[in-house]
Image: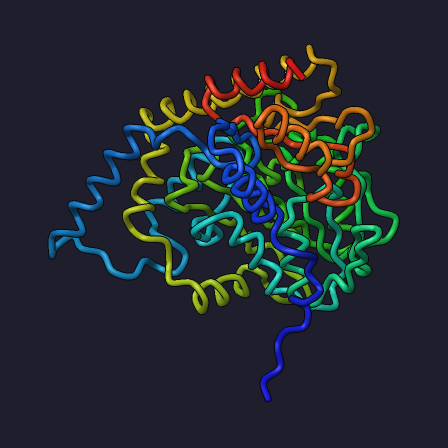
Amino acid sequence: MVKINDNYLKLPGSYLFSTIGKKVREFSAQHPDKKIISLGIGDVTLPLVPEVIKALHGAVDEMAVKETFKGYSPDLGYEFLRSTIAEKEYRTRGVNIEIDEIFISDGAKSDSGNIQEIFDTDNKVAVCDPVYPVYVDSNAMAGRAGDYDPGTGRWSKLIYMPCTSENDFAPDLPKEDPDIIYLCFPNNPTGSAITKARLQEWVDYSNRIGAVIIYDAAYEAYISEDDIPHTIYECEGAKTCAIEIRSFSKSAGFTGTRLAFTVVPKELERGGVKLNSLWARRHGTKFNGTPYIIQAGGAAVYSEAGRAQTKEQIAYYMNNAGVIREGLTAAGYSVYGGVNAPYIWMRTPKNMTSWEFFDYLLNNANVVGTPGSGFGPNGEGYFRLTAFGTYENTLEAMERIRKL
């Protein structure tokens, strides 16, 4: 008789954003006259920029001609995109990343969930708390997280690194040495950033104990302050301890077209094995490549016009972030983030739990956010809002919250 993976049964309920979607649908069905403004899920609202659209159309036309038709893409992705990324994302910042260290994929979420497959299930995993749920859930599915305690909201085998207002939502080095460390900066959900000096401490620590950092830099394009690193490889020694995951979703609006990349340096070895070769093997076996059309659109992001147009979009969203920060602060809330990231992290009022505030906001202001407790125990008492709505809806949402 077939046996299932029991680790899936340990997962609490459904995925966070599935639960939010269900609640919103139920409210909408009961109140069809209400206009709901969603500042919850981190999905973009602006269309793809003209330069990307032009490239997509051109690639579609190529697929209609025998001489330029493309089938399966290369395992790592097309060289034209990987070489552009190596130049525009890294060499311009004084970092040398080779094109065979860059793996093109269909999303940072996919890579964040899949990267754990190249590691043994006995490895100890450290995560920030609060944390992007995929890091935790994917390790739980693999059996690396232990058992879940509904009372504490913690997994028995994970090392939790508290991120609170006291440490500026950037974790301190853990007391127990982990094997795998997940870091995300600029951070989802707190909107916080980490200085280069502080990130260097993590790199030095990981090299000293032989750990590997999984560094999620999906929101790098939103950095506005000078002392914030745009890539972990700006830190000395990072190539021997860090894997970096990047995304086109929020930086160029590719949430619906799916494009990302992961960097695994060839200098990164553990147990005498290059992790680059392991990820290449996994990538070639389980992934048939991102479509040529999408990769062509991705390359257009790095053109002069593409850069200018996507920067305008990022400025639009960060202006929304400013509106949210100012609106919430004026209304008396404690507010964090929204400076180097499109996320605003706020304390819930009057000792409400995160889900109580979610219901209160939905029912009384018809505004949707994300309960902080969904990101981990230290997220309780907090709430996340995103800057990815339209400017008009963002203004209206703040006016509704102010009236509460």
Q: Nearer the viewer, residue 168 or 203?
A: 168
Q: Nearer the viewer, residue 34 or 348?
A: 34
Q: From the top left corner, tell me how far across and down residue 312 is, in percent.
A: 41, 20
Against 303, residue 68 (above or below) is below
- Place of residue 48 in the rendered image (x, y in percent of width and height, measured from the top left): 34, 32
Residue farthest toward the top in the current orientation of the protein: 330
In this figure, which colouring scheme has been used for the structure? rainbow
- Residue at 51% over, 49% down: 262
For residue 22, side relative to residue 127 (left or right): left
Image-quadrant location for residue 272: bottom right
Q: Is residue 242 above or below residue 399?
A: below
Q: Is 198 left, or right, of 368 in this rendering? A: right
Residue 161 shows up from this direction: yes
Q: Nearer the viewer, residue 284 or 317?
A: 317
Quadrant including the N terminus = bottom right
> Which quarter of the rendered picture does the C terminus lie within?
top right
Q: Residue at x 29, y 61 (%)?
A: 72
Looking at the image, residue 90 sits to the left or right of residue 17; the answer is left
Query: How many circles with numbers are drawn on the protein?
Result: 0
The answer, for residue 242, to whether it is visible in the render is: no
Determine the residue located farthest toward the right in the rendered image: 175
Q: Position of residue 381 (x, y in %)?
A: 78, 33
**Residue at 77% across, 28% down:** 168
Viewer-proximal residue, 371 or 100? 371
